[in-house]
Amino acid sequence: MSSIYFIGIGGTAMASVAVALSHMGHAITGSDMLLYPPMSTFLEEHNIRYFNGFSEKNLEETSPDLVVVGNAVSRGNPDLEYALDRRMELISMPELVRRELIGRNTSIVVAGTHGKTSTTSLAAWLLEAGGLEPGFLIGGIHENFGVGCRASGLVEQGFFATEGDEYDSAFFDKRSKFLLYRPDIAIVNNVEFDHADIFNSLDEIKRSFRLFVNLVPRSGLLLVNGDDPNSLEVSSKAFCRVERFSLDGNADWNAAEIVTGPEGTTFSLLRGGEDLGRVFVPLFGNYNVMNTLAATAAAMHAGVSFDSIVRGLASFRRPKRRMELLGDFPGGVTLMEDFAHHPTAIRVTLEAIAGMYPGRRIVACFEPRSNTTSRNIFQRELAECFDASAVVVFGKVNRPERYAPEDRLDTERLCSELAERGKIVFAAGGTGREYPGDIVGFLDGEVRTGDVVVLLSNGSFSGLKDQLTQKFKKS
């Protein structure tokens, strides 16, 4: 077994892979800045030693056989510079996953702008329900398994399900991660513009997805969102069998007679027009029905029976930070958290939450943190995606100094446009200790009994979750 060092170990995927390889017998260490729960806690619970901060002394002390370089790590990082000077072997995380975890297993890769984590989580749990002991890598902690990554439990003819991100792999490998995962069964959930820091246009993103589709062997299977024109376009020249999943009733996999209840969604599962029976999944929103269709199709192609599918779906638990309930508080307020940070994801998430809590007011708190939403690329779309909410709060734009003023997201303008739509709005402007306390102060005077407060961010929102949790407990 090897000693492996992770530069950037606090990333969700990096930490999950580190723990999985530790369980396989590798000696794991790593480093990162500003680690926060759940990943810091997760590493500590699994006895993974890590350094808070980057320093040449870290690698000098550990002297690993292999150095994994996270895709957020760039030249100038002290750990990386030391590794380069000492001619240490460097590897990207996706390459490591392919080599150590996917190996000769049947590789199921879930790609798409939205829904990757939920769909991969569903697929892995359905394979588990079918007795296939899958390995998996998802961008979050899988609540059914308690980890975000593990190796396949089968020595031969096993399965490995991977969340296939289109983001690049490392500073020395600018390929999309999903191009390294050797798909046998591939899912394309949807294709939209995102990641403006590495893609200049939707056409560039489509090109990367076409390359992904072209990796599926002729004996493999491609499952495509039949309701998304961009997904159909990038899949049009596949060499393998292609099956569509859809809600329109005209695809290989369909959901019919969809009924939403207080605990989740029930629908009839149709395969090739044949009604296989009713299934229940504790998820909300049509987008999660689509995720369920895709995962079910992949699992059934892997050999999982319909009866096992029914049991698996009913017992599925959402990954953390995917419409996660943080608490129902004495003052009649519900607090939730979701990873949504793209306008489409924000819209469908808020619509689903409104369906979960009919008649209750939605208070949406959004942090413009990603490299795309911190710019004004989605200025118009962000003004249109909060229709399901009554109150909209914007956190500070993350690292605005990276962009010229005319290129930054203008949250004051968003507030004006949303106010014209009848929304109650607030844009944080505090600095230092004032933030996110200014948001807490606004909500203190605005939140009412029965409100559902939703935190939307792909980061920590500067600790807003903990502050609001403490406040609502005292209300």
Image (cartoon, helix red, strand yellow):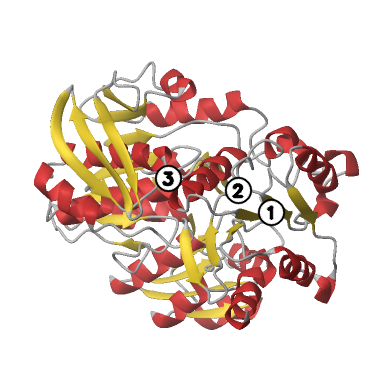
In the rendered structure, are the residues bearing label 1 and label 2 in contact, judged by CB atoms less than 8 Å apart?
yes
Please give the residue where the numbered disc 2 appears in the rendered image. Answer: 341
Horizontal and vertical percent for residue 398? 75, 56
Asked if one can make out residue 192 in the rendered structure from this viewpoint, the answer is yes
Q: CA distance from mark 1 to mark 2?
A: 8 Å
Please give the residue where the numbered disc 1 appears in the rendered image. Answer: 369
The amino acid sitting under disc 3 is Lys
The answer to whether residue 223 is above or below residue 113 is above
Find residue 116 and name its label.
Answer: 3
Asked where in the image residue 245 lies, by quadrant, the reply is top left
The image quadrant where one finds the N terminus is bottom left
Q: Nearer the viewer, residue 407 or 388?
A: 388
Q: Nearer the viewer, residue 229 or 134?
A: 229
Between circles 2 and 3, the one closer to the viewer is 2
Q: Is residue 295 left or right of residue 271?
A: right
- In terms of secondary structure, where does tag 1 sit? loop
Horizontal and vertical percent for residue 471? 65, 78
Which residue is drawn at the image coordinates 64% and 43% (left, top)? 386
The amino acid sitting under disc 1 is Arg
The answer to whether residue 344 is above or below residue 17 is above
